[in-house]
Image: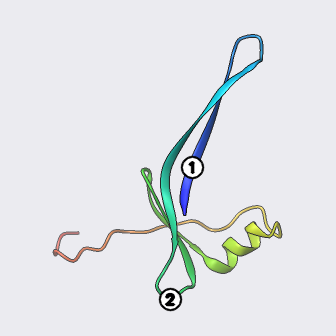
């Protein structure tokens, strides 16, 4: 699922001139199905699925967001 950012442009007199929509990244469910992974230009993050669902249903206003470190399979840290 794409993660988008909408920027609305307004003129000095307050009239809306248009909007710019850009794709900032994408979201996916992890292999175990227990977390949502967000891939953005700012970095990669993981949110527990239960917390994400609570926010989506309106039961909570925020969810924990953990930084996802890249795999170091080549031996570099």
Q: Residue at x 57, y 84 (%)?
A: 34
Residue 76 image position (x, y, % from top left): 18, 70
Circle 2 sits in a helix, a strand or a loop, which is it?
Answer: loop
Camera-nearest residue between 53 and 64: 53
Circle 1 sits in a helix, a strand or a loop, which is it?
Answer: strand
Quarter of the view holding residue 57: bottom right
Separation of marks 2 and 1 at Cα, in angstroms: 25 Å
Question: Of the residues tagged 2 and 1, which is closer to the observer?
Answer: 1
Q: Residue at x 42, y 50 (%)?
A: 41
Query: In the drawing, does residue 31 fall left or right of residue 6?
Result: left
Q: Do the residues under discs 2 and 1 have CB atoms within 8 angstroms?
A: no
Residue 47 image position (x, y, % from top left): 58, 71
Disc 1: CA contacts within 10 A as few (<14), some (14-19) or many (>=20): few
Residue 14 image position (x, y, % from top left): 77, 17
Quadrant location of the C terminus in the rendered image: bottom left
Height in image: 52 above or below 7? below
Q: Residue at x 43, y 69 (%)?
A: 68
Height in image: 68 above or below 6? below
Which residue does the numbered mark 2 point to in the structure image? 32
Picture mark count: 2
Q: Earlier in the sequence, mark 2 or mark 1?
A: 1
Quadrant location of the N terminus in the rendered image: bottom right
Disc 2: CA contacts within 10 A as few (<14), some (14-19) or many (>=20): few
Which residue does the numbered mark 1 point to in the structure image? 4
Camera-nearest residue between 72 and 52: 52
Quarter of the view holding residue 33: bottom right
Residue 31 image position (x, y, % from top left): 46, 85
Residue that sits furthest to the bottom in the current view: 32
Query: In the drawing, does residue 13 fall left or right of residue 19?
Result: right
Residue that sits furthest to the top in the current view: 13
Quarter of the view holding residue 65: bottom right
């Amino acid at each position: 699922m794409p993660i988008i950012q909408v920027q609305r442009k307004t003129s000095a007199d307050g009239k809306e001139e248009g909007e710019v929509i850009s794709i900032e990244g994408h979201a996916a469910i992890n292999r175990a199905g227990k977390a949502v992974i967000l891939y953005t230009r700012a970095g990669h993050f993981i949110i527990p699925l239960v917390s994400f669902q609570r926010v989506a249903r309106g039961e909570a206003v925020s969810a924990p967001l953990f930084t996802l470190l890249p795999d170091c399979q080549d031996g570099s840290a």
